[in-house]
Image (cartoon, helix red, strand yellow):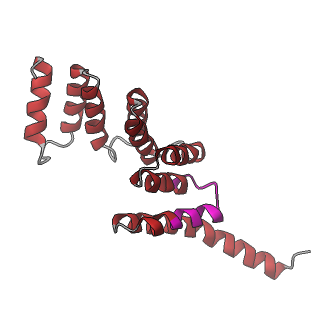
Amino acid sequence: MISRAASRITRRLLTSIHIFCPALDNLGAAYERRGDPSRAEEVPLKALAINPDVGQSHVNLGHVFYQEGRCPEAGAQPEEGLKRAPDSASGYFLVRSTFFRLGELDKAVTNLKQALTLDPQGMPRAHLQVANLYLKQHEMTAASRELQAYLRPNPSDPQAPAIKEISGQRTAGQM
């Protein structure tokens, strides 16, 4: 039988673990930005050891694998994360990257559109990614539509003039 004190300590520990996992996820992302892949991989693995049900930890681990070119693992981890956190726009965005690298463009577009649906304000550059995928498929009208969708909330983007030019050329059927 567990004493009241042990129960209290356990509850406090479990509360801090739920706070600890996102902190580990942030630390792993920082290691990745610093170019330290071994530590970047180690941190989400620790978070998953604490709580394997944290979807973002799976997504972050998948991103590390993607950066290392480990595509099968890179795709499996975010998909696992999306099972646990189906509202993760970053998860769908990462799965897109993996499908793109594997040459599965239709699946890449589907995942990008889901990321845009979930977080249109936080994922505006996803429109550029969708446009690139459409361009690879020679779907010029669809690509132009995505470029224009990106420009509407981002008219002062430094690349806006080039995007407008490409968008106009694609619409006119040039190139």
Q: Position of residue 141 (x, y in %)?
A: 22, 20
Furthest toward the front, the residue is 69
Q: Nearer the viewer, residue 50 or 64?
A: 64
| Residue extent of the magenta highlight | 42-56
Q: Quadrant of the C terminus?
A: top left
Q: Nearer the viewer, residue 85 or 170?
A: 170
Q: Nearer the viewer, residue 6 or 47?
A: 47
Q: Position of residue 30 (x, y in %)?
A: 39, 67
Q: Position of residue 15 (x, y in %)?
A: 64, 69
On the rendered structure, is 39 left or right of 35? right
Tell me if residue 78 is in the magenta stretch.
no
Q: Quadrant of the N terminus?
A: bottom right
On the rendered structure, is 57 left or right of 63? right
Count of marks placed on residues: 0
Furthest toward the right, the residue is 1
Furthest toward the top, the residue is 173
